[in-house]
Image (cartoon, rainbow, N blue to C red):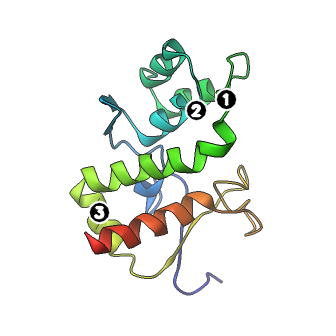
Amino acid sequence: MPEPNVIHFYSVNDEYGEFSNFAAYSIKLKGKRWPTSEHYFQAQKFQHDGHREEVRKAKTPMIAARLGRDRKKKLRRDWESIKDNVMRDAVMAKFTQHDDLRERLLATGNAKLVERTANDDYWGDGGDGSGKNMLGRILMEVREKLRKL
């Protein structure tokens, strides 16, 4: 039985799928247009401009994610300490640059937002609620900030 006042999201095809970083909403950050927030996030893992640009130009967010997880390319040293803020920047850009998304997020009221996936226990809930759900937490932070704008 679903928990009351909890909204789960994951696949772009599901209800609230636009909350996924794979959703087809471009963002403008750091003077460039990124096809999705996933493209931006994955690209920021790298110090080298060529690697970042390769991720930005990836045809799909899945390819961008794959490129971002390629450990043959050197990750920036500070990645673990900045990744949450990189995600915050991407999510804030997405929900401030698209009016329909801002309204959709605000319409969730005070619901707890949870990325439900067994594939990720950091950004998601690990599929069973044991994960950190950092993407859901960041979405709720952004929702709070948007209320004050």
| Residue 27 placement (x, y as % from top left) | 32, 40
Q: Secondary structure at mark 1?
A: loop
Vertical arrangement, residue 47 with respect to residue 145, above or below: above
**Circle 2: residue type:** Ala
Relative side of 35 to 140, left or right:
left
Relative side of 104 to 13, left or right:
left
| Residue 73 placement (x, y as % from top left) | 67, 17
Structural crowding at the residue carrying mark 2, measured as other residues with C-alpha within 10 Å and reported as few (<14), some (14–19) or many (≥20): some
Q: Secondary structure at mark 2?
A: helix
- Residue at screen point 24% across, 59% down: 100
Q: Which residue is mark 1?
A: 69
| Residue 142 placement (x, y as % from top left) | 41, 64
Relative side of 53 to 29, left or right:
right
Q: Which residue is mark 3?
A: 102
Q: Which residue is mark 2?
A: 65
Q: Quadrant of residue 96?
A: bottom left
**Circle 3: residue type:** Arg
| Residue 117 placement (x, y as % from top left) | 67, 57
Nearer to the camera, 144 or 25: 144
Q: Earlier in the sequence, mark 2 or mark 3?
A: 2
Nearer to the camera, 33 or 107: 33
- Residue at screen point 29% across, 74% down: 148
Any part of residue 9 in sight? no
Report if the CB atoms under discs 1 and 2 are less than 8 Å apart: yes
Structural crowding at the residue carrying mark 1, measured as other residues with C-alpha within 10 Å and reported as few (<14), some (14–19) or many (≥20): some
Q: Earlier in the sequence, mark 1 or mark 3?
A: 1
Q: Secondary structure at mark 3?
A: helix
Any part of residue 87 in sight? yes
Report if the CB atoms under discs 1 and 3 are less than 8 Å apart: no
Structural crowding at the residue carrying mark 3, measured as other residues with C-alpha within 10 Å and reported as few (<14), some (14–19) or many (≥20): some
